Amino acid sequence: MQETTTRQRVAGVLVLLGLLAQIVGFTGAMPTAQAVSYLLWAAVVLLWRDIPRRSRIQAGVLIVLGVLMLVVARVVYSANVDWPAMLQGNVFVATMLVGVSFISLIGTHGNKRPPGKRVTGADGVLRTWLGVHFLGTILNLSTVFMVGDRLARRSPLTTPQLLALNRGLSSAALWSPFFASMAVVIALVPEVQYGQIAMIGFPLAMLSGLLTTLELRRRFDLAEVDGFSLSPRSLLMPAGMAALVMLFHFWLTPSLTIVSIITFLLPAVAVLSNLREGSRYTLRRIRQHTATRLPAMRGEISLFLAAGLLTLGLSTLVAAAAGDDWTLFATFGMWQAMVSFAAITLSALVGLHPIIGVSVLASILNLASGEQTLFAFVALSAWAVGTSVGPLSGINLSLQGRYGVSGYRMMKNNLLYAAMMSLLSLGAIAGLSVWVN
């Protein structure tokens, strides 16, 4: 027992060091991405036997496939593979999750009941969706933990609550300028017209909230299902964090991404909030968090890192096999956009993150200026639908690691929703194709 406790504590220290190294890297003083990846993977190795069997098998398969594809790309296609850097995939997301975990050090934890007036039923589901969606447009994945942990104080999360969390966040990809999907899209097609995207994506996102509320009311008895109370007290901490993130993003550290700001800001706020009780108290809480909470994140960290390795392996293999001369479509119009949306979304069903399909598609298209906005909306809508239903998407990996729900169970419960959102997205793609051409 002592050996296990020591091993877990060492792993927790490695995770903490990984977070600190990532924060140092943000300053530009030195490149730390490789060191961060080694520290986090070393922690995963130490905690491997403690990972739940289902997650361990899933992570193991992803790791083997990722390495195998890198080997094939190198041996068969003579691709250049940066082997020392092969473990860096999804490190930014993993360290953000570690930073977000420090939210548990903010405030009082003895209260078992969430503050604010209790809301249940369809109204509660809608409020949960709205809270996660609008705060998530800024705080991204961290909002799911803020709202989910608050709901879990009363009782373990139910399927309707998990689906509201999932869909509230994933639908933000349709229009949020601060979402990871938008950052990826802008990097791939820099001439995208955001105004056109927002004018179609925002109403589509609102339809997602309405659809979620109506569907869950029909499928489940929501009478005792708690929702996120949108009272000023319950919104104080998330809204305050959102305001701080915006302050850093626009004025203090404009060169950093939202994910990077969240990674260092939440732990900093947690430490400062505890310093009011004295430095010894603060150190004790950090030490306890490092020894218990950080090792308990083994499921989340291992799945994200393994999925990152798979993404690197697949993208490297596809790039090596396809080459630079081949183009998928001579032009990118309505029908090509619809086929692309379907391909990316369907690939999510078999476990591929939409970022893989979007990146691969962008690499084999020569897009004219007017076509870039249409491609961007295809990517964002496929991302929104694909991450909601994909068992290996960031949101579902997080829900699996944090709350123990199976990614495939989430996929099954989201199939009807994904089908209906796909039809709406295809209609929006048709409309946008007429607008931009």
Image (spheres, helix red, strand yellow):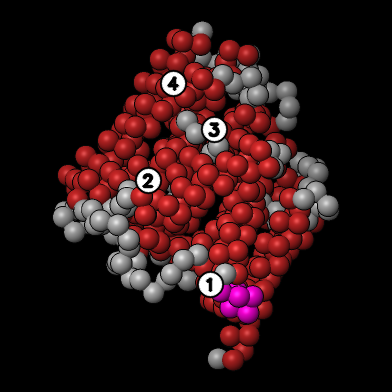
> Does 278 lie within the magenta span?
yes
Lower position in the chain sequence, tag 1 or tag 3? 3
Q: Position of residue 190 (x, y in %)?
A: 65, 24
Distance CA(mark 1)–CA(mark 4): 42 Å
Identity, as a three-letter code, of the amino acid under mark 4: Met
Identity, as a three-letter code, of the amino acid under mark 1: Arg
Tags 1 and 4 touching, CB below 8 Å: no
Q: Position of residue 264 (x, y in %)?
A: 64, 55
Left or right: 321 as drawn, with respect to 172: right
Which corner quadrant of the image does residue 172 belong to? top left
* Residue, disc 4: 199
Q: Position of residue 433 (x, y in %)?
A: 47, 14
Q: Is residue 111 above or below residue 26?
A: below
> Does 435 lie within the magenta span?
no
Q: Which residues are magenta?
A: 277-282
* Residue, disc 2: 131
Q: Residue, x 54% and y 22% (percent of image)?
A: 194
Q: Is residue 201 above or below residue 431?
A: below
